[in-house]
């Protein structure tokens, strides 16, 4: 009788245990999308921001935009064009 009960318990618990090891593959964004969003935020002057200046002040945003434009060899208008581009176009614009 104990053997029958043990087999029944093992058989019933097997499907529930299998769900514990199942992985959900609902990842939100791809790596390329995240990188494009990061480039866009950099072009807009939103990152980097110091810990004591969050959200970044207008002066920090302006300074970050200037630094981005200098690093990427563009003037302010080009930096804003890149910042306003959709994520897919931003990757092509920064290459």
Image (cartoon, rainbow, N blue to C red):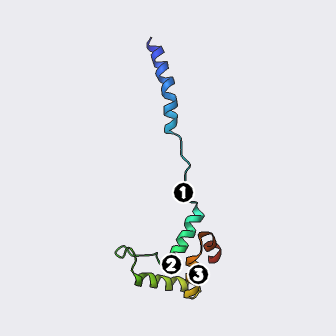
Q: Residues within 10 Å of mark 1 (few under 14, many from 20)?
A: few
- The answer to whether residue 63 is left or right of residue 34 is left
Q: Residue at horizontal 40%, vertical 77%?
A: 56
Which of disc 1 and disc 2 is earlier in sequence?
A: 1
Q: Earlier in the sequence, mark 3 or mark 1?
A: 1
Query: What crowding class fits label 2: few (fewer than 14 Cα within 10 Å), some (14-19), or many (20 or more)?
Result: many
Q: Which residue is mark 3?
A: 81
Residue at 39% of width from left, 80% of height from top?
57
Mark 2 → mark 1, Cα distance in angstroms: 23 Å
Which is more N-terminal, label 2 or label 3? Answer: 2
Q: What is the CA distance from the residue labelled 3 to the residue labelled 1?
A: 27 Å
- Please report contact status of discs 2 and 1: CB closer than 8 Å, yes or no: no
Q: Residues within 10 Å of mark 3 (few under 14, many from 20)?
A: few
Q: Secondary structure at mark 2?
A: helix
In front: 7, or 55?
Answer: 55
5 left or right of 28 in image: left
> In what element is the residue under mark 1?
loop
Gap in angstroms between the C-alphas marked 3 and 2: 10 Å
Q: Where is residue 46? Give x, y as percent.
A: 46, 76
Nearer to me, 77 or 42: 77
Q: Quadrant of residue 81?
A: bottom right
Residue 5: x percent and y percent?
Answer: 45, 16
Q: Secondary structure at mark 3?
A: helix
Residue at 49% over, 19% down: 7
Which residue does the numbered mark 1 point to in the structure image? 28
Horizontal and vertical percent position of residue 68: 52, 82
Q: Estimate the x, y position of residue 59 in percent, counting from the top left.
A: 41, 84
Q: Residue at x 45, y 84 (%)?
A: 62
Give the labeled residue for mark 2: 44
């Amino acid at each position: 009788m104990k053997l029958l009960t043990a087999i029944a318990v093992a058989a019933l618990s097997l499907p529930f245990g299998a769900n514990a090891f199942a992985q959900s593959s609902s990842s939100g964004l791809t790596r390329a999308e995240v990188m494009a969003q990061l480039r866009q935020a950099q072009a807009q002057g939103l990152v980097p921001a110091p810990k004591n200046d969050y959200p970044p002040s207008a002066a920090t945003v302006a300074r970050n935009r200037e630094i981005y434009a200098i690093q990427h060899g563009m003037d302010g208008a080009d930096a804003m064009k890149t910042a306003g581009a959709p994520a897919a176009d931003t990757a092509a614009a920064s290459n």
